[in-house]
Amino acid sequence: MGRFLLFLTAFFSSYITGYAQDITVLRLEDFDLNGKVKSCTVINSYGKEVFEFDENGRLKSTKTQYSDTDTHWVNYAYEGNYLKEKRSEHYSNGTLNKEQSIVNIYQIDTLKSSIKITEKVVSYNKEFLEQIVYTLNLKGETLSIQKLHADAVDEIKVSHTTTSSGEITEYVLNGSLQKWIRKRMVPGEGKTKIKEVLTREYFNEEPYLATEERYSPAGMLLSKEQFLYDDTVNKYLTEERHDYAYTENHILKGEKITSQNTVTEKQYVFQYDNSSTANWIRKIILPDNSYTSRVIEYYTEEVKETKKGR
């Protein structure tokens, strides 16, 4: 499934809302792209986005065109496998808005038993905004996130344990549990095993949100169920559930959305380019008949015609 929301949502999603950021490097596969893609222009209802990639498949820049006069640019620089710098620039009427533009600078220190990544955030007016220090183990798992800003220091401790019920990850902010994640394998259809990821979020150490996701052996999202905690009955109640169906070639073909007493079904039709990797260039959603279009440029291939699939 595509991730064509605004890139800032996709890339810098919070570990804990408002407290820390994910510094994972995004690649072609995170945007449903394959092969030697140089750029991908996405056209949809809220505007136009351009994603550019380097020859190693890493995201190099994004441009979001909200209107003829409102543009957001993000550029990325790498050092080895890590992000070195990110520049986020806002333009209004062709003029750079320095108050809304920032640069994130990353310093990577590899220690004997851990990796430390220091992120400094500075405005284009040269104002220091904050510093975030990520500590990872050698497997790449986050151990702690420390955020220093003007009037406080916040620290998230992250623990990883394996129990009989699955792999457990906990995020504790300044001594208060914020997020709990359990990953485990559960029975699927026939004799298959599928991955289940249960995430619970807390406010003042009280439960309030939960999400359960299930993935096929091939890694495709099969279902996503969202819950709200009801303290009158002391349990999570389903708010909305999404079930997804795929073709034999692992292409999304349908979605069923169940919410309260309402059931909505959608079908997806894709048109593909004629490259050797057959990337989709139009996604049509039925019965709405809405669509998203993509214009794809390759480093080594030329696309001459399109083919339709479902």
Image (tube, grey):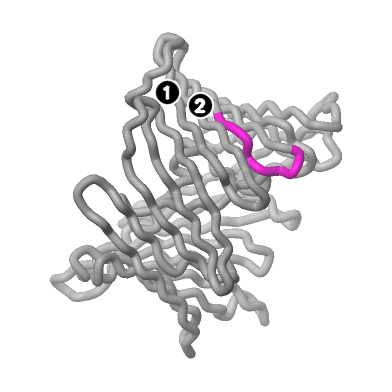
**Magenta-colored span:** 55-62
Tell me: residue 222, above or below residue 26: below
Instruction: Verify whether residue 92 appears in magenta.
Output: no
Camera-side residue of 66 and 193: 66
Tell me: residue 236, above or below residue 270: below
In three-dimensional space, the C-alpha distance between marks 1 and 2, rounded to whole angstroms, equals: 6 Å
Residue 164 location in percent, x, y? 48, 90
Camera-side residue of 287 and 224: 224
Residue 254 location in percent, x, y? 58, 50
Q: Quadrant of residue 100?
A: top left
Residue holding disc 2: 73
Looking at the figure, which quarter contains the C terminus?
A: top right
Give the side of residue 60 with respect to residue 225, left or right: right
Residue holding disc 1: 90
Amino acid type at circle 2 is Trp
Give the side of residue 26 with respect to residue 201, left or right: right
Camera-side residue of 138 and 31: 138
The secondary structure type at the circle numbered 1 is: strand
Residue that appears at 43% across and 73% down: 169
Instruction: Verify whether residue 60 appears in magenta.
Output: yes
Q: Quadrant of residue 62?
A: top right
Amino acid type at circle 1 is His
Residue 83 location in percent, x, y? 57, 46
| Residue furthest bottom in the image | 164
Camera-side residue of 38 and 87: 87
Earlier along the polypeptide chain: callout 1 or callout 2? 2
Q: Quadrant of residue 91?
A: top left
Residue 85 location in percent, x, y? 53, 40
Residue that appears at 85% across and 24% down: 304
